[in-house]
Image (tube, grey):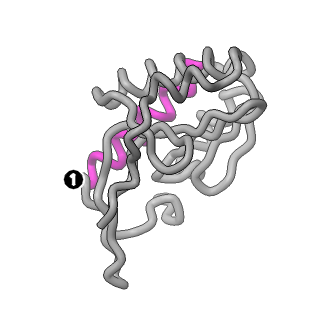
Amino acid sequence: MTDPKNDNSVKDYIASLDEQTAKDSQVLIEMMQRISGHKPKLWNAGTLGFDSYHYKYDSGREGDGHILGFHPKKGKTTIYLMDGTARYPELLSKLGKHTTTGYCIYIKRLSAVELPILEQIMQKSYENIKSQDGHINQILWQTVKK
């Protein structure tokens, strides 16, 4: 199994971003590090991830993923909720200007959202995945608990 985290420096990566994206990224890094207690690592092409969990599906496919993470891009930062956005309709309605898909929150600028609400969403997501004992055998974002 190959490790999705690469050896590039997070610091160098942040330095390569435009000024506003770098500033927003620093805020997200501090927030996600505070929630997870882990430093960021680069996963794949440009995703900063915090902490990890192991998954194994009934098909036998398995691997590791980050519990919290985001991909900073100019004009749209993607925040990953590995347990899915559908779990947080009330909080998302109070978040501010954003869009969502199954497990992503898209934000143009952090100044357009309520950071305490974003932190609550990420905290709940982190706790939900950690409550799975770090081993997930289903795609959580496709499973909405009622």
Q: Is residue 91 magenta?
A: no
x and y percentages locating residue 39 in the rendered image: 33, 28
Which residue: 25% across, 60% down?
135
x and y percentages locating residue 81 in the rendered image: 51, 46
Residue 38, compared with residue 88, is above or below; it is: above
| Quadrant occupied by the N terminus | bottom left
Query: What secondary structure predominates along the stretch shown in magenta?
Result: helix
x and y percentages locating residue 138 in the rendered image: 39, 69
Q: Is residue 118 magenta?
A: yes
Which residue: 48% across, 28% down?
120
The residue tagged 1 is 133
Which residue: 66% across, 28% down?
95
Amino acid on which disc 1 is placed: Asp
- Give the residues in magenta: 115-132
For this view, does 130 lie left or right of residue 123? left
Residue 137 lies in what quarter of the image?
A: bottom left
Q: Secondary structure at mark 1?
A: loop
Q: Nearer the viewer, residue 6 or 89?
A: 6
For this view, does 10 lie left or right of residue 109? left
Which residue: 43% across, 28% down?
32
